Image (tube, rainbow, N blue to C red):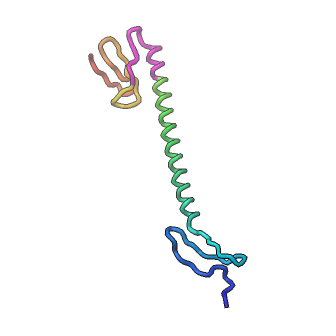
């Protein structure tokens, strides 16, 4: 006599658990264990999206800071000052050339030409 349990047997098949079922006289396969794999993959993707969003916000903040500093330097400097680029020392400052020197507006780095 068969048990009232719908699972006839249980065995492992690769990474998923496969259980034959008897439904309406036919043999069907039920897959288990894939849901947790999908959930883990989704969690990994969500963590990656959050990390990329943080990096994007940081880059936007740096760009805003550079534009603000550049505008301030160009507005307040004498006619001989020109904007040269970003500072390699601190990574966020703006390099301004005044006469024969280069100066970082953030960390104060100076270089004579």
Above or below for 24 versus 77: below
Q: Position of residue 88 (x, y in %)?
A: 34, 29
Magenta stretch in the rendered image = 69-85
Answer left or right for 9 relative to 4. left
* Quarter of the rendering containing residue 105: top left
Residue lying at the far front in this picture: please name it: 26
Q: Position of residue 60 (x, y in %)?
A: 50, 32
Answer left or right for 6 relative to 97. right
Say which residue appears at 51% left-offset and 37% top-offset: 57
Above or below for 92 versus 113: below
Q: Position of residue 55 (x, y in %)?
A: 48, 40
Q: Nearer the viewer, residue 36 or 20?
A: 20
Q: Nearer the viewer, residue 6 or 71?
A: 6
Residue lying at the far right in this picture: please name it: 24
Task: Reply yes or no: does residue 76 show up in magenta.
Answer: yes
Task: Reply yes or no: does residue 43 show up in magenta.
Answer: no
């Amino acid at each position: 006599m068969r048990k009232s349990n719908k699972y006839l047997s249980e065995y492992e098949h690769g990474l998923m658990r496969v259980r034959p079922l008897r439904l309406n006289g036919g043999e069907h396969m039920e897959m288990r264990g894939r849901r947790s794999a999908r959930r883990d993959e989704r969690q990994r993707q969500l963590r990656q999206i959050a990390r990329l969003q943080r990096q994007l916000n940081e880059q936007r903040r740096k760009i805003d800071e550079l534009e603000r500093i550049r505008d301030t330097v160009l507005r307040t400097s004498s006619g001989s000052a020109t904007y040269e680029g970003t500072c390699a020392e601190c990574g966020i400052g703006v390099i301004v050339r005044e006469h024969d020197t280069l100066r970082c507006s953030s960390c104060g780095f100076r270089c004579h030409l």
